[in-house]
Image (cartoon, grey):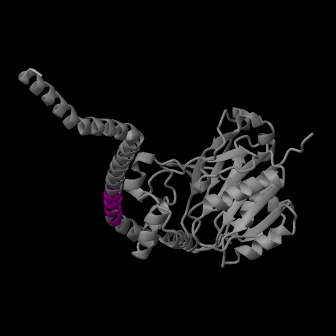
Amino acid sequence: MREFKVVMTVMVRDEADVIAAMLEHHLAQGIDLILVTDNGSVDGTRQILAEYEQSGRVIVSDYLAHDKNQTAVVSAMASRAATEFNATWVINADADEFFIPTNPETTLKEALQHTPTGVGSFSVPVVNMTGEPAARGGWVNRLVLRDKREEGSLMETVALHAHPSDDVIHIGRPGVTVQQGNHGVDIPSLGRPSAEYDMEVHHFPWRTYEQYSTKVMNTGLSYDANPLLNPSPRHHGMRDYRLLRAGLLEDVYLHRHPFSGDEKGFSPDDRVARGLHRLLEGGAAVHPSLLESALSDEWGSYDDVRRRRAKEVSELVIPLVVEEVGASTRWRDLYRGEAARRLRAERDADELRRELRGSLPTRLDARRTRVRRFAALPGRVARYAARRLRRALGR
């Protein structure tokens, strides 16, 4: 009987503040093997990964080109999970994503063991986790609020287009293609786990301003280096990249976080934090010293004066961002419409040329027949005229 195995893939770049916590969490959740591709990190991430590789449950590869080629890299890892490691299920995650079962009495692996592989693939909802902002330092104990703000107002209020798209878990299959961002695969979804064994993703995108500004810079430079990729005007990374270059990202970063005691649009959820503390306190962490920094209560706080100033700046900047995104989207749609019209015209012209080429032999044959008839016409006329003349002369 084939061994049941869950393999996770992760592509990372400069995630030293979160990668240890992410690996510890998922190894404790029963993930059998984690395949990691490091995208040329320079902040110590690669050294942390080397420490976890010694456990035998983490395998690290390197991809040094900063070209945002996530689809190809992750697809290759997902295929390898099936061909080389016989994965029953494959989870493609980001370094700031923590998959957890909704039932606290079970682990992620146990939940997947109760999910029939016949479903092929299924979506997993992703929720942003937030809390008090910080310039640098520990983040796990701060970010314990689920972001439940009304999606329709996010852009106008905090310059966010939407809440995160769902992730996808899929069966192991050679040659699988994973979409950019890990939000889809080319394996059809024919069902999902039962409610008892459902799961979700806790996403920690804004842990500190130091971390987030680095991530935004890396994203923007990677897209700049790969002109074949064409992110939407609404793409959060490129939008924040423009804010960073304008010197306004820190104000908007602060404005996105709730003030202390402000629970409107947020709800408490510290399951990830509690789980990581249990690992550390119970001696079950693979590398306790690497986990401790994420659990630290030391961070660079912002005072209320700075946050009020950020709010004032953001309320001036965000309407301009909304206007820019709207204009860019309209131009993009207009361009796509014009491109589609030109494509249809080219296809119509190609079809007409094919029809003409296909009918050309028949048309040439008909022309040859007409030419032969016209060529014979003068002789016939002459003979007809001669007969009339002979009759007229009585001969």
Of residues 352 and 75, the one drawn nearer to the viewer in this rendering? 352
Residue 324 belongs to the span the image colors magenta? yes
Residue positioned 45% across, 47% down in the render: 151
Residue positioned 77% across, 67% down in the render: 60
Of residues 235 and 347, the one drawn nearer to the viewer in this rendering? 347
Tell me where residue 343 appears, x and y as whole percent: 38, 50
Q: Quadrant of residue 245?
A: bottom left
Q: In the figure, is residue 271 to the left or right of 163?
A: right
Residue positioned 59% across, 50% down in the render: 183
Question: Compared to 381, does 39 lie above or below?
Answer: below
Question: Compared to 241, does 117 lie above or below?
Answer: above
Tell me where residue 301 appears, x and y as whole percent: 55, 72
Q: In the figure, is residue 165 to the left or right of 245?
A: right
Q: Quadrant of residue 366?
A: top left
Tell me where residue 35 appears, x and y as whole percent: 76, 61
Q: In the figure, is residue 272 to the left or right of 134?
A: right
Q: How many marks?
A: 0
Of residues 358 and 196, the one drawn nearer to the viewer in this rendering? 358
The answer to whether residue 40 of the structure is visible from this angle is: yes
Q: Quadrant of the N terminus?
A: top right
Tell me where residue 196 appears, x and y as whole percent: 73, 34
Boundaries of the magenta span: 317-328
Residue positioned 37% across, 54% down in the render: 156
